[in-house]
Amino acid sequence: EEQKSLLLDSSSRFVIPQGVKLSYGTAGFREDASILSSTVYRVGILAALRSLKTQSVIGVMITASHNKVSDNGVKIADPNGGMLSQHWEPFADAIANASSPQQLLQLINEFVEKERIPFLGVRPAEILLGRDTRPSGEALLEAARQGVTSIVGAVASDMGILTTPQLHWMVRARNKGLKASEQDYFEQLSNSFKCLMDLIPTERSKFDGMNDKLVVDGANGVGGAKLQVLHKLLNVLDIEVRNSSEDEGVLNDGVGADYVQKEKVAPHGFGSKDAGIRCASLDGDADRLVYFLVPPESNAQVNLVDGDKILSLFAVFIKEQLSFLNEKEDLKNSHKARLGIVQTAYANGASTNYLKHLGLEVNFTPTGVKYLHEKAAEFDIGIYFEANGHGTILFSESFIEWLEVKSRDLSSGSKGSEAEKAALRLLAVSNLINQAVGDALSGVLLVEVILKHMGWSIHRWNELYHDLPSRQLKVKVADRTAVVTANAETVVVRPPGLQDAINTETAKYTQGRCFVRPSGTEDVVRVYAEASTQEATDTLANCVAKLVV
Ligand code: NG1
Ligand code: ZN
């Protein structure tokens, strides 16, 4: 009864806007911020129920990532720091669209019953709330808090302005019983970075004559300021951060990783004066990272070093460490680690060829971090990246334990051996790179230390392989759900005949590859094409776009 009146009372303060149908997509709920408060309030309720069900800490992040500043959004971090279990998404959709407090209450009651969510005699719900720098964030965070506290006994902690990966990291750390404050996050990253720096082979510790400075575009979002904090703790890297707050410009407006990757132009504040310098760009909530080189001519395209190339750099480094470890086959406890690479169909074909050529196992999943993450978790070490710069490296618990034992065994034997250093490096990577979600801050640190380890400039790195020309188009259609795909979105199964037509078109081009799929975040069908020249690629993409409408 107390619960019932609490819910009816609080939900009457959050009236659902007329005529909007919301859906918990790959990025949670995302809309114009002005219509989101009832949705965020209801997500607060869901988070509290999820916490009761799992008897763990749950996170709620308020962000719309790379979208425009007037948008906002909300997503849940599950107990392990990952995305909300897909099994709960239909409930999220249902309550977000419930038309009255009574209907909301009924849906909650049914769900509590069906999922057997415990209320009595259990640990009360505990939720960590975070938000990015959007002006609408403060009020929406309050709406989330009211949603959480409308469940009897539930506690909401406001963690303040954070990057999305920081909040996911905190949720994961809390549930593992580890230190989980923002300061702990910064310390873990900087300590493991320093550890990797100390393990750089002395003969390689010089860059190959290139400018050692890194300039980072913070998208006028939350990432720039957080990177400054890390930078102060590190005091070894030469990093300049631009576009680090609203004072310098509008969030995601002509800046940020999404803009740089899609438009292939330099963000605001970068120009020919930066030609040849190593540059990087974060997105608005700092879960995506791309590197780029500004061309000397002022209106030319940037040289993009995208998520595929970051993945390739990480793969080369990890593979090198594993080969050091496997050299000493006589060691007890020998273990051939399974390294797996996970990409989507948007990965440039040249990157896939390169990775296969290294002898690595490359897997494909549909677009959406939850699919990539899940696949990568099947390996001892799983590296996943989307071309747009979201990705990370996952280490299995059993492999970490094995590494800990191994590094101890090795240190008692041949002191300072390559195998011992390799084990220590892999352990440091597992602490540096965010195990919950892709994290641009930990990504920057890992890229920087690997470049130093290899003695590579960004130019050398960029030469690992040459991207095939590619083109992405958006097609507005009456109903994007009419397009249904299979095989990690590479094949259209509906409408009938479309795939045959795409095949016929693609076959006309050298190194031609093309696929179409409905977007999960926008009301469009996306077309992606690759071929041996940019001109051919554009023609292929345009022809296929005409087949879709
Ligand atoms: P959709 O709209 O489903 O293509 C986009 C990105 C994804 C992912 C999600 C979530 C592309 C082609 N797609 O998905 O990679 O980042 O947004 O933000 O970049
Ligand atoms: Zn983002």
Image (spheres, rainbow, N blue to C red):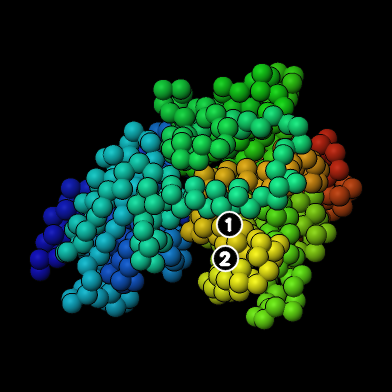
Q: Residue at x 39, y 44 (%)?
A: 162
| Viewer-closest of 173 and 30 | 173
Q: Residue at x 70, y 55 (%)?
A: 317
Instruction: Please tell me how many numbered marks the rendered image carries.
Output: 2
Task: Tell me the amino acid under the disc marked 1.
Answer: Val
Give left or right: position of 413 versus 180: right
Image spot of residue 361 (x, y percent): 74, 66
Image spot of residue 443 (x, y percent): 57, 47
Image spot of residue 394 (x, y percent): 57, 62
User: Can residue 123 be spotted in the picture?
Assistant: yes
CB atoms at circles 1 and 2 under 8 Å apart? Answer: yes
Q: Residues within 10 Å of mark 2 (few under 14, many from 20)?
A: many
Q: Is residue 461 above or below residue 344?
A: above
Give left or right: position of 410 versus 541: left
Q: Residue at x 56, y 57 (%)?
A: 428
Res. 535 image quadrant: top right
Q: Secondary structure at mark 1?
A: helix
- Cα separation, mark 1 vs mark 2, equals 9 Å
Res. 489 image quadrant: bottom right
Q: Is residue 541 above or below residue 174?
A: above
- The tag on residue 403 is none
Q: Residues within 10 Å of mark 1 (few under 14, many from 20)?
A: many
Q: Nearer the viewer, mark 1 or mark 2?
A: 1
Which of disc 2 and disc 1 is earlier in sequence? 2
Q: Which residue is mark 1?
A: 429
| Viewer-closest of 327 and 19 | 327
Give left or right: position of 230 versus 5: right
Image spot of residue 430 (x, y percent): 55, 60
Task: Tell me the amino acid under the disc marked 2.
Answer: Phe
Q: Which residue is mark 2?
A: 395
Res. 280 image quadrant: top right
Q: Residue at x 70, y 75 (%)?
A: 336
